[in-house]
Image (cartoon, helix red, strand yellow):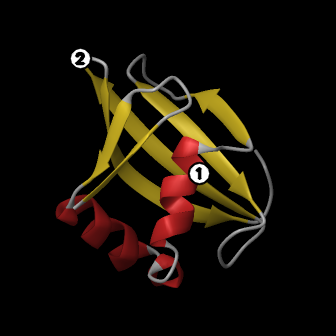
Amino acid sequence: MRETADPDGRRVTLDAASWAHIIGRHDVLEFHLEDLLRAVSQPDRRMPGRRADEEFYYLAGAGPSLWIKVVVHYEQNQGRIVTAFPRRRFP
């Protein structure tokens, strides 16, 4: 569906199933697709995820809340956005 590159230059994709999951759970993000992609390509904050192959990307001041959090899973140096949601504060 869409793709971007993370700050390390790795390809990150967002497929239709993940997008449907995101807007199905967080419909307020429906009109913020570009913000989700920007959170990955130009994050304000970035943290390791809970798993070795996972990273969290945060974008401030975009979307319906103070932050957007995007979760990316990596396999063989390529990423896939698996979910995203608004956050009122940074964790």
Q: Amino acid at mark 2?
A: Gln
Q: Position of residue 69 (x, y in %)?
A: 59, 53
Q: Position of residue 87 (x, y in %)?
A: 69, 62
Q: Image check: 31 left or right of 78?
A: right
Question: Which residue is depicted at the point 48% across and 55% down?
Answer: 37
Task: Tell me the crowding category of disc 2: few under 14, some 14 to 19, or many 20 or more residues within 10 angstroms, Cα based.
Answer: few
- Quadrant placement of the C terminus: top right
Q: Image check: 60 left or right of 10?
A: right
* Residue indicated by mark 2: 76
Camera-nearest residue between 81 and 7 = 7
Which one is earlier in the sequence, the residue at label 1 or at label 2? 1
Tell me the element at label 2.
loop
How many marks on residues?
2
* Residue indicated by mark 1: 39
Question: Which residue is depicted at the point 43% across and 28% down?
Answer: 54
Cα–Cα gap, marks 1 and 2:
21 Å
Task: Tell me the crowding category of disc 1: few under 14, some 14 to 19, or many 20 or more residues within 10 angstroms, Cα based.
Answer: many
Looking at the rendering, which quadrant does residue 78 occupy? top left
Q: Image check: 23 left or right of 18?
A: right
Question: Which residue is depicted at the point 56% across and 30% down?
Answer: 7
- Quadrant placement of the N terminus: bottom left
Q: Position of residue 49 (x, y in %)?
A: 52, 29
Determine whether 70 is above or below 1 in the image. above
Determine whether 64 is above or below 38 in the image. below
Question: Which residue is depicted at the point 45% across and 70% down?
Answer: 33
Q: Position of residue 70 (x, y in %)?
A: 51, 50
Tell me the element at label 1.
helix
Determine whether 14 is above or below 26 in the image. above
Q: Image check: 10 left or right of 42?
A: left
Asked if the residue under mark 2 is in contact with the one under mark 1, i.e. CB atoms within 8 Å, the reply is no
Q: Amino acid at mark 1?
A: Ala
Determine whether 31 is above or below 2 in the image. below
